Structures are given as structure tokens and as C-alpha cells.
Amino acid sequence: MAYDLTTDIGKVRLLLNDTDDTDEVFTDGELQAFLDLEGSIKLAAAQALDTIADNEALASKVVTSQDVKIDGARLADSLRKRAETLRSQADDPSGGFEIVDFEYTPGAITW
């Protein structure tokens, strides 16, 4: 069954790029648990990414096969950075913009 973007679980899957229903990283129940624990879609996705990163770091492997190299620690670091970005977005729903009061005073700016 394809993931459903109208549900919170589907939105978490989208942020995780866990959208291949034949090879999902997490079950719907696991994603619901992240949602219950974290209280928001972005924080749930961040925690799920940290969980994937922890698994990669615990495996801590570098695999080279033919001309392909997979570095688990490096992948874990990249996943943690993505998780931190999601946490920052969740903490600042304005997207990084701040609305400030501005008062113009004629002659206040000189060159």
C-alpha cells in the first residue's frame, strides 16, 4: 500500500524519504510512536533519522564492493545533520524569518 500524504505518518515518511512501500525502514506503528513521543511531524522525522543514524554508527562499517564505497559513520553524520535541520525548522515555524517593528526617522540614515 502506498504511503498517504494526508496522514501524519505519511508526512513523516516523506521527510524521511521512506516512501518505498516494498522496502520501508519503519512500520506505521514505529512512526506513530515517534509522533506520540515527539509531538510534531518534523520532530518525529528527526528522531527517526537519529535512530537510523544510530544504527549506522553502531554498525560502524566501511564497505567497498567493486567501485562502490559505503561509509556507515559518514552516512550517520549526514543523517544527524538532516535531523538537526528538521529540529531547527520545528523550533522556528516562521522558516527563519523574524518580523520586527521598524520605525523610519527622516535624517536618521547618513552616508
Image (tube, rainbow, N blue to C red):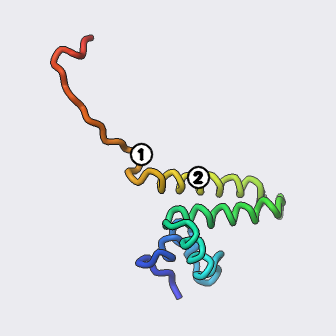
- Picture coordinates of residue 51, whole percent (x, y): 69, 65
Q: Is residue 68 above or below residue 35?
A: above
Q: Is residue 71 above or below residue 33?
A: above
Mark 2, residues whose alpha carbon is within 10 Å: few (<14), some, or many (≥20)? some
Q: Residue furthest left?
A: 106
Residue at image position (15%, 18%) is: 106
Q: Residue furthest bottom?
A: 1
- Label 1 vs label 2: CA separation? 14 Å
Between residues 80 and 2, which one lies in front from this camera angle?
Answer: 80
- Quadrant position of residue 33: bottom right
Between residues 11 and 74, which one lies in front from this camera angle?
Answer: 11
Badge 1 or badge 2: first in the primary sequence: 2
Which quadrant does the C terminus fall into? Answer: top left
Is residue 70 shown left or right of residue 16? right
- Picture coordinates of residue 18, whole percent (x, y): 58, 72
SS under mark 2: helix
Residue at image position (40%, 50%) is: 95
Disc 2 designates what residue? 84
Q: Is residue 100 above or below residue 88?
A: above
SS under mark 1: loop
Between residues 94 and 70, which one lies in front from this camera angle?
Answer: 94
Disc 1 designates what residue? 96
> Which numbered dot is residue 71?
none
